[in-house]
Amino acid sequence: MPKVLIAGEVQDGKLAGVSGELVAAALKLTGNPRDVSIALACDDAAGSAENALACGVGSVYVIEHPALKGAGQGGFDAPVTAFVALLNAEKPDVFLMARTDFGYNVAPRVAFRLGVPVAQDCIDLAWDAASNAAVVTRPVYGGNAMAVYRFKEQRPQIVIVRPKTFEPAASNLSPVGEIKRFGVEIPDSHSRARLVESVKEQRAGVRLEEAQVVVAGGRGLGGPEPFKQLQDLASVLGGALGASRAACDAGWIDHSHQIGLTGKSIGPRVYITVGISGASQHMAGCSGAKTIVAINRDPDANIFKEARYGVVGDWQKILPAFIETVREIKRS
Ligand SMILES: Cc1cc2nc3c(=O)[nH]c(=O)nc-3n(C[C@H](O)[C@H](O)[C@H](O)COP(=O)(O)OP(=O)(O)OC[C@H]3O[C@@H](n4cnc5c(N)ncnc54)[C@H](O)[C@@H]3O)c2cc1C
C-alpha cells in the first residue's frame, strides 16, 4: 500500500480542521495509519504537532523556520522549499494538500519543482493496486461532469482535495506515532514575494465553512434587503449566512459569503437555500451538506433534484412563516 504524506495546515497555533479531512482521505488510500504522515511547515509547531499526532498517524514531521511564519508571509515561497526538501528526503508515494489558499498556491509549485503531475480539486480518491497508482475523481466542465484520472508511475503523486468532501478522521486519544524534526535551509533569496498587508475579515458568529447550519439566498431574493431576514433565520439556528454568486455579483451581499465552485465549500448538517436555482457551479460548493432544504417558486429548479425537503412557492410568503415556526420550536 502507498505511503502518504499530508501537508498539514496550522491556524492560530492549532492543526486546522481541513487537515483531519486529509487524514481521512489518506486512510482511504492506505488502510494502515502508520503509512500516513503529516508535515507541518511553520515557525512554531508547539501545539499543532500534538494535534497532528492525535489524528492517529504514523509520523508527524515538524519543519520549523522563521521564514515559514504565516505560510511564508503569504508569498508561499518558503513552504514550497520546505516541502520539496522533505519530499525528496522521504519519498512518499502520494502527497496530499487541501484546496485552500495554501494548497492551491503551494501544491502546483511543488509539482513543478519536482517535475511531477498534480490533480486539482479532487472529491474522491482510491489506490489501484494493479497499476500501483492513485485514481482520483474531479469535477470538469464547471461541475457538469466527473472525470476519473489515473496517475502514471511518477512519485510523488500530488493530489489537491476539496475541503468538506471527507469527514475528518476522529482524533485518537492514545497516539501511536512519533514526532520527527526535519531541518531545512531556506535562503532569503527563495522568498521572492513579500506580504505587504494582511486584513482580517471581520465577522460576528460562526464561520461559513465550519457552520452546522447554513442559510443562503440567491437572485430570487430580488435585492439586498431580504438577506436581513435570512441572517435572522441563520442566527436563530446558530448558523451562518451564505449566497449564490449571482447575489454576490449583484452587490447584494459580500463575496465572502459566496458558496460554490469559485466560492466557499461548506459541509453543514442542514443547508437552507432561498431563491437559488441550484446551478452545478453552486452545488459544487455544498456537496458536503447532509440535508438540503430548498425554497423556490419553480418546481423544475435543479435545486429540487438535490434537496431532501423542498417548498415550491414564493419565498416572501413562505419565509416569514418558516422563521416564526423555527422561533416557536426554539422557545418550546
Ligand atoms: C466558471 C463559473 C464559476 C461559477 N461559480 C459559482 C459559484 O461559486 N457559486 C455560484 O452560486 N454560482 C457560480 N456560478 C454561476 C452559476 O452558474 C449560476 O449562474 C448561479 O449560481 C445562479 O445563481 P442563483 O441560483 O442565485 O440565480 P438564478 O439561477 O437566476 O436562480 C434564481 C432562482 O430563484 C427562483 N426565484 C425567483 N423568484 C423567486 C421567489 N419570489 N420565490 C422563490 N424563488 C424564486 C427562480 O425560480 C430561480 O430558480 C459560476 C459560473 C461559472 C461559469
Image (spheres, helix red, strand yellow):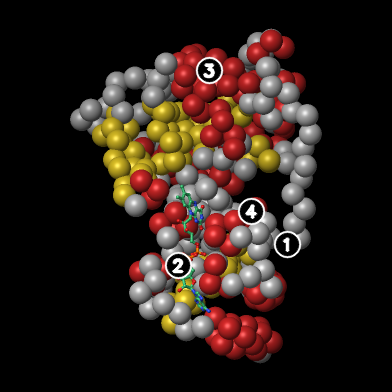
Of tags 4 and 3, which is closer to the observer?
4
Which amino acid lies under the numbered mark 1 shown in the image of this protein? Gly
Label 2 C-beta lies within 8 Å of the nearest ligand 1 atom:
yes
User: CB under 8 Å between callouts 1 and 2?
Assistant: no
The C terminus appears in which quarter of the rendering?
bottom right
Which amino acid lies under the numbered mark 4 shown in the image of this protein? His
Q: Earlier in the sequence, mark 4 or mark 3?
A: 3
Q: Label 3 to label 1, Cα distance in Å? A: 38 Å
Q: Is residue 238 left or right of residue 295?
A: right
Q: Label 2 to label 4, Cα distance in Å? A: 18 Å
Q: Please name the residue that numbered disc 3 is placed on.
A: 84
Counting from the top left corner in percent of width and height, residue 129 is at: 24, 32
Which amino acid lies under the numbered mark 2 shown in the image of this protein? Ser
SS class of the residue under badge 1?
loop
For residue 89, above or below residue 32: above
In terms of depth relative to the viewer, which is nearer, 257 or 127?
Answer: 257
In terms of depth relative to the viewer, which is nearer, 268 or 224?
Answer: 224
The N terminus appears in which quarter of the rendering?
top left
Residue at 65% over, 37% down: 10
Residue at 58% over, 25% down: 61
Counting from the top left corner in percent of width and height, residue 131 is at: 23, 28
Q: Earlier in the sequence, mark 3 or mark 2?
A: 3
SS class of the residue under badge 2?
loop
Q: Please name the residue that numbered disc 1 is placed on.
A: 205
Q: Earlier in the sequence, mark 4 or mark 1?
A: 1
Q: Earlier in the sequence, mark 3 or mark 1?
A: 3
Crowd around label 4: few <14 · some 14–19 · many ≥20 (10 Å): some
